[in-house]
Structure formats: structure tokens, C-alpha cells
Amino acid sequence: MSRTPPFRLPRGGRLIDRAFQLAFRFDGRHLRGVQGDTLASALLANGQMLMGRSFKYHRPRGPLASGAEEPNALFGLGQGGRFEPNQRASTTALVAGMVLRSQNCWPSLDADVGAINTWLSPLLPAGFYYKTFIHPRPFWKHLFEPIIRRSAGLGRAPTDPDPDRYEQAYGFADVVVVGGGIAGLTAARDAADRGGRVIVLEQNPHWGGRTPTDHDGGQAAIDALLADLRARANVTLRRNCMATGLYDHGYLLARESLADHDPNQGIPRQRLWRIRAGHVITATGALERPLSFACNDVPGVMLASAVRDFITDYGVAPGRRIAVVTNNDDAYRTALTAQGAGLEVVAVIDARPQATGDLPQAVRAAGIPVLTGTAIAKVKGGTHVEGVALCDQAGTGRVTGTLDCDVVAMSGGWSPVVHLYSHCGGRITWDEAQAMFRPDPARPPLGADGKPMVTPLGAANGDLRCAGGLERTEAPTVPVWVMPSGAPYRLRAKMWLDFQNDVKVSDVELAAREGYASVEHAKRYTTLGMATDQGKTSNINGLAVLSNALDQPLEATGTTTFRPPYTPLTLGTIAAEARGEAFQPLRKTPIHDWHASHGASFEPVGHWRRPYSYPRSGEDRHAAVNREILAVRHGVGTLDASTLGKIVVKGADAGRFLDMMYTNMMSTLPVGKCRYGLMCNENGFLMDDGVVARLSGDTWLCHTTTGGADRIHAHMEDWLQCEWWDWQVWTASLTEQYAQIAVAGPKARELLQRLPGTIDLNQETLPFMQWATGELAGIPARIYRISFSGELSYEIAVPANRGLELWETLHDTGRDLGITPYGTEAMHVMRAEKGFIMIGDETDGTVIPQDLGLHWAISKKKPDYIGKRAQARSFMKDGSRWQLVGLESLDGRVLPDGAYAVEPGVNANGQRRTQGRVTSSYHSPTLNRPIAMGLVRHGPARMGQVLDFPLPGGGMMQARIVDPVFYDKEGTRLNG
Amino acid sequence: MLILFCPYCGVKAEETELAPGGEAHLKRIGPDGTAEEFEAYLFARKNLKGVHFERWRHAYGCGKWFLAARDTHTMQVYGTYKAQTAHATDDIVANARQARPEWVPDWPQASEAVAG
């Protein structure tokens, strides 16, 4: 039977305003809706029932529901950076000028080539992919995977940056009520009476839930409650606010739509509320279940509640001749509503043997036929409903008659929305009498105090009666999981459970036969409930089918885990303002602006930005690095080392404490001297290194790596607070109190001696690995004679606010010496030329100092230090560990960083055996050839041997094992 | 998203302010420990359903480490206490036993006290 206009009813539609027409485009067609429409109601009002294609078989699909549970009517919405896939037509408000695109179809929604899959469906049962694409193995990578990937995923991701703004806000309340229906509003009023702050969240733009649609006097009852609540100072009402997840100790996330799909408002599009609730009341209502009969997915088969919502709320006729099929009394409301709107109701098909409640009697009195004990054998029609074939519910599907109709309104009963309640540990129980899972009052989620933190109320608690005395008595729902009860395979293979993912009754039964008895396994094998709707309409029906196939009660099957979010959240809302420059705080040294104004090319190091190099015009980053290195090797250069961690350790037991922290002896370090120290964790692995200076009898200053500063300070505090809390030791991070400048190169001393000051910089008074304090260029300074470059080098620490002054003074004074600022990359190359290790390059959390030939920095005398016991484990000492060596490329090319050295044979997985890897690799401008360091098995004992390094994409490089110190092995330069 | 009371600051701290530190009351095994003792110290951690003692640092607060007695199943917090404490205090033990009567502390003094 064909569908005929008009589709917008002459009267009714409590949520729309017909005076305001809104133009929009759907797949290029220009259509009109009215203010208050959802996309679904607007399309239905234009006679557009076909709204999507299913994921696997590309079956034509119309809207199933009118709320958040909608599985079929999903669209790509918007254009450019505002494009969003999988937007639910049922909950997205129509905005003038909207552009909708249908999904999962090609070339068009009406003529979709992929629909051939529906003819192939006997060949594509559950687990098809798992079974088919395993052999032959090479086919997987080159043939099957590319094809599957291209056809995988529903909708298309946007490609442009999202131009909208999003924000986050914090909320605090004694009671949060989720759900603005009559149960929620009543609970809010009662909570407000008890005092304390109350927040009420409603997912829809309008209040009242189902009450105004389903009950005479419902709107008046809601209006009265709202008026009461709005007058209270301690109550906050938020519409368009979807509670998406409830977490431990009352932490509730909610997404508030502010200007969804309407960028012209100039306000943030969405707001993510992060609410801490003393107590949460979930009045989240219930979702109607479909019935499983053959071809229940043909467009025009809808939930009974959705049919009356479209009629009552939006004044839209989904069809002209409506058949209702049900196992409960509630669906009879749809028959009365449809008839009241002037539509023909051909019959109510009730699977129960009898229907004698108030509602069925009212339907009979209205002249509508009620067929009890009857089922739908099959829906007729391809792209829209044309009629139904009837049969006995108790039989095997022998057709007893047919009805012409263009809409089937089905109701398989109601499932309480237990998602939020379940997110944080609340348990549910099977209620046989009502055929539903509902919250188990004995096992609610608990708060920090061990008391229940969630109270489910109303339909969400399994109480389907309307609060406030508006209810008519209803007879019980009788579970109907398959229609008819003795349906043969031919029919069961056409009964859809999961409409979006195309999971049918026969698929779940197949999973059970093949041994997927656990509900979690059956879900993943069939993909039941794994679509964007997360099984809101399909899960319970699927569990029931699985239970029947396993011949066990539903309670024994249980449910899959309910996980947040309840409905999808866009990543923009989760990120909110934390994007671009506000993504994370940026740390700048006191000399940062000078670097920026002198052309520095920055790199991130932790939260810092450090100059990588300072390219001059006509130079790229790497040419600049080479120039900077040569300038330091032959003249003098400056490095901003302010980012290095600087931790002061002080107290009567400070020396004893540092002896535990470092592998070498720090307690014996004389005042005025510096010592390079290694820090390990209890696993024995190297975690940080740096120079320690003893400032006074009870004070040491520990330098850490830039990235390790916070972590190492926390590490020290951990041991001090939790293990040796009786030791007299205090620590403080002075990282940001000092600016620190490395002045390095053979002309470093000459430069510094030009500056007025009180510090004697001669080799005799300030030799390598000592420090001195005084005044330099009128600035209080501490000068460390330490070197990471291998050159004569001074690191000068001054108060942070005078760092820039010293830096500029150095550059003014040293111009004729060719003073050159150098960046982190020059520093890295120079330390590698010198064979110095770098934490994070030569170490990766599995390397002990002994692997790096650093035995000289490990005390043999100390009875204990962090990591000492671990380093005595047998596999740390068995001699076969990979150890540090230098690597000399044979053909003059630079080895790729991270390349592996292979050896003959394969391992248990058929992969080439490896015997080492490259940890640092550079072109050395000093030596004008490539240099590299690496870890190689028995490396130091294999000097001169050549290793093979296969390259990604084919080819091979060879390198000779050499000493890791490539430059100034005797150390005459840094001692000079 | 837990809320734990910081015994140093005296405030309720959000999980986002805190850094977790694993199981509490471990006894450090030094260079003299046997291989078995050291393995247990380094790797063997309780993974229980019920009363658990754990380390937390008020990382974005006072920076201090403190200890929490928490139920890994129900998320109930039986109490928090300073890190420089050999065992959970008696009131925390009482809270835990009220919620889980079958639970017995695994340190000797308290067990005797409970038994007595």
C-alpha cells in the first residue's frame, strides 16, 4: 500500500510551532520543516520514511524510535569542519539551513549498490569474517584487510578542524536528579524540601518525559511541578543536558547542548558538566523493546511509543493505516492516539491469549479490532510496509490472514534505563513478573561512605506506572521473544534484533550453537549491541534469544556491561578549551624571548620549549646545528640550560640520603666540588643522571635532566616521606629560581675573564668539576666548571630575573670572539661525539648503568643504594646483556636511529634474531663523518667486528663496532 | 573518580589532585635479601577484592604521601592516614570490619585485638 500526503496532520503537535517554517537540505533536496521539529519528524512530514541503510546488508531502514535509542536514522550533518557523522535524527533539533546527508549507501539512499549484501546474507552469518579471511595468510594483509577496512565503520569522519568552541564547567550538588519526567521532577521537589542544592538534568529540550504524551492531565501536572521548582533558590534546572556517565563517589558527567548545529549564536556549542553529587537520583525512564517477527526491519515498522510521539508531539502521521502489535497494554495507547488524530487503526495484534485491561477495553469500545493470541508471521513490503501476514502466536507461522497497512507500531514491553546506575557498580536483577531487568535494591552502587549513592526511581526502577495518580491500570506484559513462538528458521533468519549492525535471531542462535555461551562472547561474535546505539533496543531481546538457545533462565545469562557514555560524546566536548595554545601550559626560560627574536627553531622538552638551533637566513635547522657545533669547538658558544632540574637537598642526614639515591658516593664529596651521579629505581634501571655539587656541610644541589626534574623531586620525596621519614633531610626544587647558561668552547675563559667579577676563573683555582660563587658582571652568580660538550665549559647560575641580562652581556662582550648561541641538537651531537650517554636515548627503562660502561660511577663501598639489590640479580650479571659501544658506518651514511643489528637465524615467531640496536646516531661536523652509539650483545668485547643493520623498506647498512668516545678521548679539552 | 581525605591538608581531595602509588606497607628488601624475598618485594602485589591499603600522594595539593584503606569492590573508603604509620589505625580497622565482618587484618597486633 502506498503512502499518500499530507504527512503533517492538520492539528496537534505539542512541541512544534507551525508559524515558523525552517528550510533544510537532505541529500541535495530542498525540504521544509517547522520550529520544534526533530530531523526525524521533519523528514516524516515530507513523506521521507527511508532514512538510512543498515551497516552489513545495506537494508533500507526508517526511523524505529523517537529518542536516544534510535538505531537506524543516522545522518552526516553539516559541512566542512562542522560535518558530523552518525547524528540521530530522533534527537537532533532541526535548525534552519541544515544540510543532511544519508550514510552507508552508494550511489544514493534509494539505489544502493551495497544492498546486494542482503541477497548474499545467507552467506554472511555471524562470525563470517572470522571464519573466512583466515587463510591463506598473505591474502589477509594484501586483499582482505583493505577491502574490509574500506567497508568498515558507519559514517565518515570529518577532515577539517572543528571551528566550534566547547567548554567545561564544574557543578556541585547535594542531590542530582537525572531525568525531568514526572518521577524526576517529583523527586527533585522532595529533595529540595529537605534542603541542600539540587540539580535536575533533562536530556530533551522539553520537560516531562512521556507523561504529557501518554496521560490526560500530564502536561498540567508537569507544569505545576516546574512552577514550584523554578521558584526555589536551591534548585537548578538544566534542559538539553544529557547525563552521559556516572563514576565513583558521585562523579557525574553531563553534556549540555548550548548552540548545537547553530554556529550563528556565537556561544560555545556544547558544555561538559563535571558534577560532584552527594547523591544521584536516576529517573531516567524506560525504553520500549521491539518485537522479533519476520521482516521487522522494513521501513514503517516502528516502536509503538514512537508512533504516538510523532503524532502527539510533532503532528506528523507516520502512515495512514496503522497496525499495532504488542504483548502489553501500553501499546493500546498508540491505537487510541492514532485514531484520535484521524488515522485508521486496522487492528491491535496482541500475542497474549487475552486482553481485558482498561486500555484494551477502551480500544474495543472505539471500534478497533483486537486480535488476541495472534502474531505477525511476516511484514510485507520492501522499502516500506505494505501489509502484514497474521498467524497464531502459539504456532509455527501458518498464515491465517493478512492486513493492509503502511505502519506497524510494535511493543515488546519496556526496559528500565539502568545505564547510569550500572556504570558505577549497581547490580540489576531479572524481574520475571514484569519481564525486565531492573535495579536490585539489595545491591546499589556505594559511595565513599559505604552507603548507596544512587536511588533509581519511577520507570528507571521498574515502576512503569505514572506518578501522580494519572495512571490507568494495566495488565501484565507477557514476554514474547520470538513471534510466533514456534517460528521456523526461515522466519528466524529474518527477525532483526540489532537493526544497525544487522544481527538477527538466527545469528545469536548460531553463536550459542558454536559455543559462545558467555553473553560477552556472543556479543562480540555477533556484534549484537556494538553499534553506535550500543544496543539500547536490541540487548534484552538478544539476551532472551541467547538464553532460550542455551536453555537457561535470563538471570543466568545476565547482561553485558553497561559502560559510559550513554550516548556518544563528541571529542570536541571532551577536549573543550584544551586545544591549540591552551592544550597544556607552556614553560619559558627567562631567556626565551631572546631566543625567539634571534630566529630560534624550538622543540618541546617536557612542558618547555627549547631552541633546537638558531637558523640564519638561507640556513635550515641542520645546517645551523653544524655551524653551532663548529663555533663551540673552535671558539665559544652559549646554551640556555635553565631548564635543568635543580633540587637542593639539605639536612643532617642529607649525605646519607644522597648515598641511597645515587649509585655513587655523594656524602664524601668535598664542599666546592661537583660529581656526576646516576640515579636508579628499585628495579636497578637507570632513571636519571646529572651533576651534584656540594654547597656546604649539610647542603647539596642536585642537577637533573630537564624532563626528569619533577619526577626526580617526587622520587626523593617518596623515599623521604615513606621509608626514611626519621632522617633529617629537606628537599626543595629551585629549578625556576635560577637561570643557567653554559659557556663552552676554547675561548670560554677568555670571554668570562673580560667581565668584571669576584670569581677567579683560572684553571688552578677553578679546575674541572669544581664550583665557585661570587659576582660576575655585577650579578650574583655560582659558576660550575662542568662540561656536557667536551669543551672547556662553565655553567653559570644567576637569579632567574637576571638571566637575560647576563646572556646579553655575554653576547655583547664576545662578539669579536664569534660567540654563538647553540641549541639542544648541537648539545646532543657534541655529547655523542664525546661518548656521553643521554637519558632516554641510551636508556629506555630497561638499561642498567653497567650496560653503559658506567661502572666507575657505581660505588663498590656503599652497603646499599636504590637499585643495588636489583643489579645483583643473575640476569643483570650474566654477561649476555647488550652493552654500549660506538658504531662506525662503513659506507659513510648515517645509521637510522633505532635500527636493529641482526644475527643469523630466526626466533620462535619466525623473526630475524637481533643482537643490538642504534641508540644515538648523527652526522658529526667535528669529524666530518657519521657517528653512532648503540647497545650490542657482548659489544665491548667485539671491537672491530662488523654488524648488519637491515633498513626499513629493504636494503642493509653495515657498521663497525668501535669505542664510543669519538672526540678528545683523553679529555684534555674539557680539562684545559 | 575517588574522593580521599588528605590527612595533612585536612581537605577532601579529588582523584585528579592525587597520584596513586600502589600497595602500602611494603617492607623494603635491601642488598642482603634473598632472591625470593626481593622478588616478592619488587613484584608480588596483592590483587584482592575487598579491603586494600594503598599509597596516594596529594600531588596537586600539599605534595605529601598518605595511605588509604579502600574497598576495591565497593569503593568504600574506610579511612586515610599518614604515611608514617606502621598500620591502619583502630578506627579504620573497625570501619572495615563493620562493612566486611569476615575480613581480618594481616598484622599481628590488630588481629589479636580483634580476636580479644
Image (tube, coloured by chain):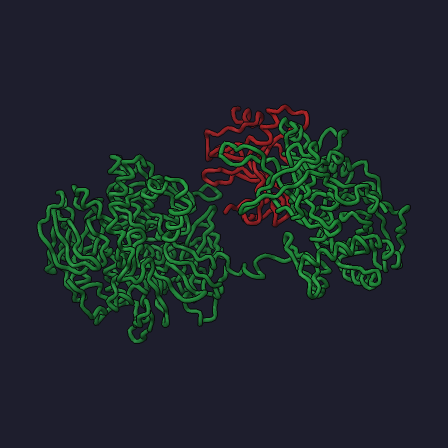
Q: Seen in the image, is A491 located left or right of residue A581?
A: left
Report x, y in % for residue A330. 21, 53
Report x, y in % for residue A828. 70, 49
In the rendered image of the structure, the colour used to display chain A is green
Q: Residue furthest front?
A: A891
The answer to whether residue A6 is above or below residue A116 is below
Q: In the rendered view of the protein, which quadrant contains the N terminus of chain A?
A: bottom left
Colour-to-chain, red: B
The answer to whether residue A462 is above or below residue A26 is above
Q: Nearer the viewer, residue A424 or A961?
A: A961
Q: What count of labels does the image hold?
A: 0
Q: Is residue A217 visible?
A: no
Q: Nearer the viewer, residue A4 or A959?
A: A959
Q: Nearer the viewer, residue A524 or A20?
A: A524
The answer to whether residue A245 is above or below residue A166 is above
Q: Seen in the image, is A360 located left or right of residue A446?
A: left
- Residue at 32%, 60% in the rendered image: A106
- Residue at 31%, 72% in the rendered image: A30
- Residue at 32%, 46% in the rendered image: A528
Rendering quarter of residue A155: bottom left
- Residue at 70%, 53% in the rendered image: A824
Report x, y in % for residue A232. 42, 62
Report x, y in % for residue B43. 57, 31
Q: Nearer the viewer, residue A684 or A874?
A: A874
Q: Residue furthest left?
A: A400
Q: Residue furthest bottom?
A: A19
Q: Is residue A350 visible?
A: yes
